[in-house]
Amino acid sequence: MTEVMKRPRSVDLEITSRCDARCRYCYCMNNEGVAYHDLPAQRWLDFLDECGRAKVMRVCIAGGEPFMRDDLFEIIDAVVRNHMRFQILTNGRKVTPEVAQRLKDTRRCDSVQVSLDGSAAEVHESMRGVGSFEPALRAIKTLHAAGLPTTVRVTVHAQNIEDLPNIARLLLEEIGLPSFSTNSISSLGTKAKYAGLFMTAAQRLRAMQVLATLDAQYPGRIQATAGPLAEFKMFHEMEFARLRGETIPGRGRLVGCGCFHERLAVRADGAYAPCVMLPQMILGYIGQDALLDVWRNSDALNALRQRIYLPLASFAECRGCEYLEMCTGNCAGTALSDLGDANRPSPEGCLRQFRDTLHTEGLSCHGTETTGYASTNAQGGFDMSRGMGYNAADGAKREEAGR
């Protein structure tokens, strides 16, 4: 049995299901089995008092669009009163200098994250809707000027791959943010709503190439825990280990997600969920089920915590894979959406499947030339074994020399 923390370190609060944007790929909306209605402020205030008593350290305030609530600052005041820190996720439409200063004055705002998918309106708005670019850009500049920790999330998709260098230049050079993060469209919730939105294997490969090059150009300033850049780094690590005949310690099981061990989510209707990426899994309801009781005793949550002991070799689709002992099994949320079972490996992050799909399209993960951080060849390949600027043979030589 996995040892569980006495309390969640942080709680993700989707305080509203309302939003003034209609992003085509939003994981929050249009999920079967999810009730989209909001709780009155008092329910959230009571719950935040409970979080305070439980010694929760941090909350992430999201939605929907949290600024759609006229009582947002009443909720934020309850966070501060209970000695917690907070982050807000927003599309930026309702961010003003006055809002930014009020957030800063709490002295407990860890960051405000704004979504931006392009350096120009036509790119950003291809997925996020007409009229959404200027408010997002203005919000980023306003928050940064106010001295608030300002983060930007770029969702990579087919329409903005070639604009990524322009986005990086805008955010890191022109505005002067210390960093930004990237992910990509993933199958979360009801899979059917994503029809036609996913990148092809060739597009994912191109996104990896562009982002890996940018990561070399701006060292440590482009962050990713999912999406093309994160996949490139993981795929490189896996391929490098395979070429050396090694395994990666701690892999070979369903260890791709650790959030069940330190955080919890609450939907806009008050339902507890294991994670914002598993909105269909209801663990109870705030005001009816005690936070610490759900955290410690929920059968469904405790079952998810045991997935880290499930060997990938026990799944037919993984048997015989040369990457078996280097793989994490990937995201439980995408596994549930794709396969109907959170306790299976997710095909979305499968290196073997990605490699084989590229092969059918006449492309390859393996190239012949190394250019800085990323390795490519003239045919559009991408050398996962050499992508960090070294290859397996060179690495072995350095080890033998004791370097």
Image: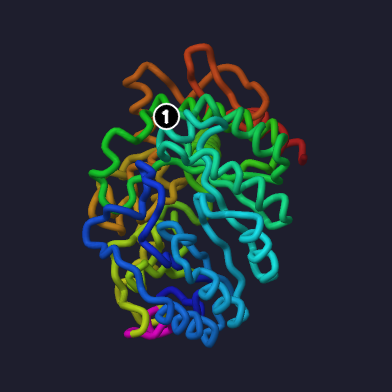
> Which residue is at 32% across, 40% downward?
320
- Magenta region: 288-294
The residue that disc 1 covers is 158
Q: Helix or strand or loop: what does disc 1 sit on?
A: loop
Q: Nearer the viewer, residue 260 or 312?
A: 260
> Which residue is at 43% across, 28% downward?
159
Camera sees residue 2:
yes
Q: Nearer the viewer, residue 270 or 272?
A: 270
Q: In the shown orientation, is residue 268 left or right of residue 84?
A: left
Give the number of callouts: 1
Is 208 magenta? The answer is no
Callout 1 amino acid: Ala
Position of the C terminus by quadrant: top right
Q: In the shown orientation, is residue 316 left or right of residue 390?
A: left
**x and y percent of residue 256 in the render?**
44, 54
> Which residue is at 54% across, 50% downward?
92
Quadrant hosting residue 306: bottom left
**x and y percent of residue 230 in the render?**
52, 42
Quadrant hosting residue 169: top right
Q: Residue furthest bottom?
A: 53
Q: In the shown orientation, is residue 360 left or right of residue 379?
A: left
Quadrant hosting residue 167: top right
**x and y percent of residue 333 in the render?**
35, 55
> Which residue is at 52% across, 46% downward?
115
Q: Residue furthest top?
A: 378
